Amino acid sequence: MKKTLLFLTLTAASIATVAQTASNRWNIGAGIGFTDFVNPINKQFLMVDKWRGNANLNIQRYLGKSFDGRLNVGFGEAFYPVALNQAFANQTVPSNFDQAQKGRMAYENSSFFDGGLNLVYKFANGYIIKEDAFIQPYLFSGVGINSINKIGTQNGSNLGGAGSDQINPYIPVGFGLGFNLSDKFNAAAEYGYKVALGESYSYGSSAFRIGYNFGGGAAAAPAAGAASTEETAINASWCNNYNWKVGVGANFNSFEAVQRAQNFILEDYTTSLGINLTKYVSRFFDVRAGLGFGNVFYPIQKGATQPHDGDNWSGTKGNTSYGSAQMIDFNLQPVLKFANGSWMRENAIFAPYVYAGPGVNYITSIGNWNAAPIVGNANQKTYGTDDVNFHISSGLGFNFRTSDRFSVQIEGGRNWKLDNSYSYNQAAIRGVYALGNCAGTAPAKPKVSTEAPKVVDSDGDGIPDLTDECPYVPGKPEMFGCPDSDNDGIGDSRDKCPFEAGPASNNGCPEVAKVEEPVKAAEPTKTAEPTKTSTSKTKNVVGNYEIFFTGCNTLAPGQVETLQQIATMLKSNPNYTLEIGGNTAKGGSKSCALQRAQKVAQLLRMKGVNVSNAKVTSYGDSRPKYNSGQDNRADVQIYSFE
């Protein structure tokens, strides 16, 4: 019987999209994946003959320039290792696996479901590789869970039954390459190793998929010399600290191996439910209470009179084994936040922290230390009594904010014993939601002035700037404060062809407007080469700008600032010369290319720039630069002569 796959996961687009911004934050991908379980006989990887394919799906969310989060799901089939010397009802990684019988292993075809949340670090973040690079490498990790069904069905009647299902947690670690195919489409190839946390085997997993960006169009690239403020804008309005936060997720517990005092034995990790409540104290400190409940593997020393019978027990180490038990643990921990305004911004998207504090756990069904010996074995006793233990916890964590109130936390630490119990490691991943009011310093709200607004009329035409569509050029009220450069009765702000007369029925453009490539005028017959003098001037480029469009003459977001930079430079240097060339993407309209150049000239004129001597022309699609929609642009070059 197939079990429903439930999972909690941490994530970030494993593939960075073309200039993904606040209005284009999601990616959905689909493709094929392959699973490769580790050969338990010789720990061999990458056995292609043991790979099985499955469908692979993911949903990815933009978190910042460097991080994305994603939900990754796979379903299909897998070859799963089966120990033939064990009943199929117990088919896990066998705790009593007989090393002498390694040869009695077989691979069984099983149904396979796999899901996880990944945090993705993108190298194409503008710091290491350009954000719009074609090839975009990335790393990922997080948590996940798989369901392996129908294990051992081939010979179940002869080998102990039809088998049982397994649900196993894991931690994925991997790398991948993303490929930008267009503004909306991308592809990815990746490989990861999934470290088993339960009683399953670790395995390799590869995937190939096609992705699609949605949630808005890709924004144009920033103008030359302009700094990107996208990441700042994401969390600019987030509250620094809320009074209360509640977190829910998974705890991973691993008791120290008592035979050799070894830590971090992944096969002995177990998963439990974790809940915590955090209270804001100051910008440096929070305090939180945490509660966990679930199964653990607890060391049991046969023949001992208490859970840990002193340190001088080398002769009885062989009598120690792990037994399944239930544990409830409670911790009270002060938390030191690095995002405190002095070391990092308080509302940072990525913020580390450290914690420490006292705790107690209650472990049930681990051993009846005073029970009567079993007949025939004086050192073996029955099991079933509880134990209460105290400890001091300490650890390091990372907080990833995905919105104003929601964040994801990953942390790991050590619980140090204070009594006769065992120390143990505890990691966690949880979702955290903020409650109550903002306790930290919230972003400053604009002050509401009680004074009457001052009327500003920059061009002195009697029309206030607030309602003047051309605030820096004198105009007429009937033209909404703009001039009429071509005298066709339509103001420049609403005339699509402000330098060519045309009727209102055609938006101010001539009825038949031919757009031709610029043609050089025929040169007159030369009789003698003029003598060059020392007064000839050198043409120097002092500025190159690009203005991007989403339609024939509709500016893309963020272009007004670039136009203002151009206007400021030209008004400060009236001797500069201006050339404006309209462009279009491959196969686009040449008429649109000319309209873009004219639109830039019109807007500069509205900002008080003298464009009477500017060269305004159309290049059509003859000058591709981006091979994408970003080629719908106008190139602005500014020259000086010396």
Image (cartoon, rainbow, N blue to C red):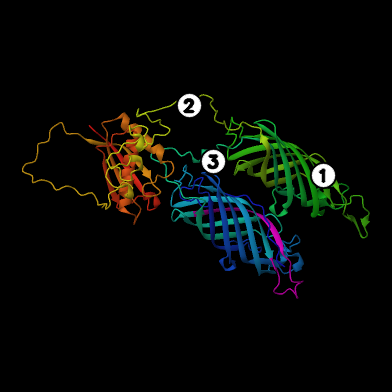
**Mark 2 and mark 1 in contact (Cβ < 8 Å)?**
no
Q: Name the foreground residue: 489 vs 416.
A: 489
Q: Is residue 68 left or right of residue 623?
A: right
Q: Relative to 141, is 484 above or below?
A: above
**Quarter of the image where one finds residue 92:** bottom right
Residue matched to label 3: 234
Q: Residues within 10 Å of mark 3 (few under 14, many from 20)?
A: some
Residues under labels 2 and 3: Cα distance? Answer: 31 Å
Query: Can you name the residue that lies furthest to the front here?
Result: 478
- Identify the amino acid type marked 1: Asn
Q: Which mark is residue 613?
A: none
- Identify the amino acid type marked 3: Ile
Dot 2 falls on a residue whose secondary structure is: loop
The numbered mark, 2 or 3, whose residue comes first in the sequence reads 3
Which of the two discs, 3 and 1, sits closer to the camera? Answer: 3
Which of the two discs, 1 and 2, sits closer to the camera? Answer: 2
Residue matched to label 1: 312
**Quarter of the image where one finds residue 443:** top right
Residue matched to label 2: 453
* Residue 526 x %, y %: 8, 44
| Residue segment shown in magenta | 149-177
Residue at 19%, 48% (x, y): give it: 520
Determine if the magenta segment contains residue 64: no
Q: Is residue 76 left or right of residue 369?
A: left
Residue at 33%, 47% (x, y): give it: 507
Q: Would residue 417 be seen by someone viewing this image from the given angle?
A: yes
* Residue 307 x %, y %: 84, 47
